[in-house]
Amino acid sequence: EALRAHDRGGVEPLEISLDQFREALTRENRTLKRALTDPRIFSGIGNAYSDEILFHAQLSPVQSTGLLKPEQIEELYGAVRSTLELWTQRLRDEVGDGFPEKVTAFRKEMAVHGRYKEPCPVCGTAVQRIRHADNEVNYCPRCQTAGKLLADRSLSRLLKADWPRSIDELEDRQEEIAKQREPAPPKPPPPKPAPPKTRARASSRTQAAAGGSTKVPKKVAKKATTRPAKKAAQKPGPA
Ligand SMILES: [Zn+2]
């Protein structure tokens, strides 16, 4: 059966209790994003749903499962259920009696997934991302990571030490960049060459100040006076 072929041993998240959820989630210490999307742990939570779940639980995708507080696990359990139920219902409404297909692509109703740079529906902050080879993690840096930006490898490589540590820093920088990109105000006219009269006066004044002569400090380098030949001559000659 098709379903069984996809079964890789993960538990069905809508069919488990909070205790079972906690047990599955914390069996290994992983980041939340990895734990949620690992088919050996949970069945059917892909990249898109996991972004949405973490957003609704207000948890960072890189938070370690081993360091979660009990109330955070409970919050996450609730977010898993509400997100999956919401999308199952939405897809059912769309396809009628047909079997709802898994959502992996961007859906416009999603809060953060596939919405890089779009405003967070809760706080309006630009949604951020962590890019990997074949996918992308999207999150809100205010709702989920306390203002901290998670290092995006390709971007941090590009910016090196310039990588902003917080969303505030990033926004400040983007404001600066936006200002620089704004259509430049009318350019001031190019500097006019000074009228010849003034120039002549200026140059004569300069000459007068300098006493009409050019001072060139000369440093006369003393030539080395050591003469190894003399020293050698003082030595007794070979017998
Ligand atoms: Zn937000």
Image (cartoon, rainbow, N blue to C red):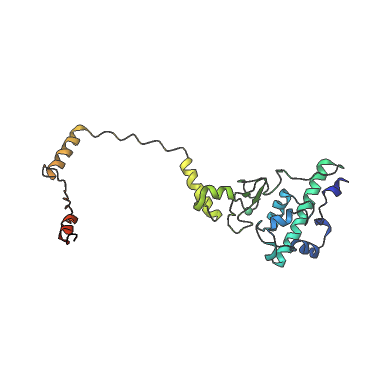
Front residue of this view, candidates 199 and 11: 11
Residue 127 percent coordinates (x, y):
62, 49
Q: Residue at x 72, y 54 (%)?
A: 53
Q: Residue furthest front?
A: 239
From the top left corner, tell me how far across and down residue 153 is, in percent. Answer: 58, 50
* Residue 154 located left or right of residue 14: left
Quadrant where the C terminus lies? Answer: bottom left
What x and y, as percent, mark residue 150? 59, 54
Q: Quick one: which residue is furthest to the right in this view?
A: 1
Q: Residue at x 73, y 55 (%)?
A: 36
In this figure, what is the number of numbered marks? 0
Residue 148 spot, x, y in % from top left = 58, 57
Q: Which is nearer the eye, 129 or 132?
A: 132
Q: Quadrant of residue 98?
A: top right
Q: Can you name the residue that lies furthest to the bottom here?
A: 70
Q: Quadrant of residue 82?
A: bottom right
Would you say 130 lies left or right of 2 here? Answer: left
Q: Is residue 68 above or below residue 130?
A: below
Q: Is residue 142 left or right of residue 22?
A: left
Foreground of the two, 121 or 67: 67
Q: Nearer the viewer, residue 96 or 134?
A: 134
